[in-house]
Amino acid sequence: MKISVCGKGGSGKSTIVTLLANEAQARGYQVLVVDSDESNTGLFRMLGFYQPPIPLMELVGGKKSLREKMNQSNVLTEASILIEDIPPRYFLERNGIKLVSIGKILQSLEGCACPMGVLSREFLKKLILKADELVFVDMEAGVEHFGRGVETSIDSVLTVVEPSFDSLEVAGRIHSLASGIGIKNIWAIVNKVPSEAIATKLEDELKKRDIDVIGRIHLDHEVFKSNVEGSVLNKGRAAEEIRDVLDCLLLHHGREVFENVPGSSLSK
Ligand SMILES: Nc1ncnc2c1ncn2[C@@H]1O[C@H](COP(=O)(O)OP(=O)(O)OP(=O)(O)O)[C@@H](O)[C@H]1O
Ligand SMILES: [Mg+2]
């Protein structure tokens, strides 16, 4: 299953990807985290790495020559890619979690990020997963990635909503763009929840926008602590609350797979 974690800038996408990856790994899944955010660089630290992986963009010769190099033979030009096909130089692994990065904008006047969107889309499309493999994609903030078609092969879109009007508005746009390309599993979680009253208010607002909410993650000082110390985020309230979110994602995906098995009692 490929899950894309989206939302407004700063809503907690990288934190939620980290929590989900840690929880899935603890349950015995093989986890690949794809850093598809070309601007922010914090994800590798949250996952406990000391440096970022060499971006896949380098495998195709960097941004400028992406178009020409996509025609030269490498793992990214294959019709399909297995996680084990990713060359060791281009991923980091720690405690059974692998991290790949699409690429980062490092210099000013480097041009737009569209080629990275193309690479994200193609990589995710070609990636074939085994039953015990889960992919979590840390998306760039906002909705531009939908314009670049990054989500075309994504199974579930999880939107992270923090207590702000902007965050709700972005969630609404994500929901309509994701439904527009036929994604059935579109969920939201409310994050950085300071009180039950605020959580209820946010959930009501999301319901008005027809968005199903599958979890509440409270403001948790363990999240701040692990961010400041660079320690692994696997304890505290948020780490407990993410369990229900992963359960829900897995349950719906399992049901969908079963429905598509010819002859199953749930098949359409
Ligand atoms: N549940 C939480 N409790 C406490 N702090 C949180 C929580 N979720 C996120 N944060 C904090 O909020 C800040 C933003 O989180 P994060 O970097 O995960 O957001 P993001 O959506 O990935 O941001 P960006 O759009 O910049 O990539 C971080 O300082 C993080 O520690
Ligand atoms: Mg982030």
Image: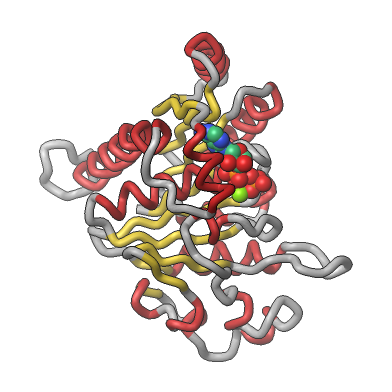
Q: Nearer the viewer, residue 160 or 264?
A: 160
Q: Quadrant of the C terminus?
A: top left
Q: Is residue 192 above or below residue 106?
A: above
Q: Is residue 14 above or below residue 203?
A: below
What residue is shown at x 43% (from left), y 82% (from top)?
A: 88
- Quarter of the rendered image showing ligand 1: top right
Kindly indicate the quadrant of the structure image that contains residue 243: top left
Q: Nearer the viewer, residue 83 or 91?
A: 91
Image coordinates for residue 152, horizontal then vertical, percent: 51, 54
Left/right placement of residue 226 relative to residue 27 reads right
What residue is shown at x 51% (from left), y 33% (from top)?
A: 221
Kindly indicate the quadrant of the structure image that contains residue 127: bottom left
Residue that sits furthest to the top in the current view: 197
Image coordinates for residue 12, horizontal then vertical, percent: 57, 39
Image coordinates for residue 42, horizontal then vertical, percent: 61, 56
Q: How is the image coloured?
A: secondary structure
What residue is shown at x 54% (from left), y 67% (from top)?
A: 50
Kindly indicate the quadrant of the structure image that contains residue 184: top left
Q: Is residue 51 above or below residue 38?
A: below
Left/right placement of residue 133 relative to residue 152 reads left
Left/right placement of residue 140 relative to residue 131 reads right
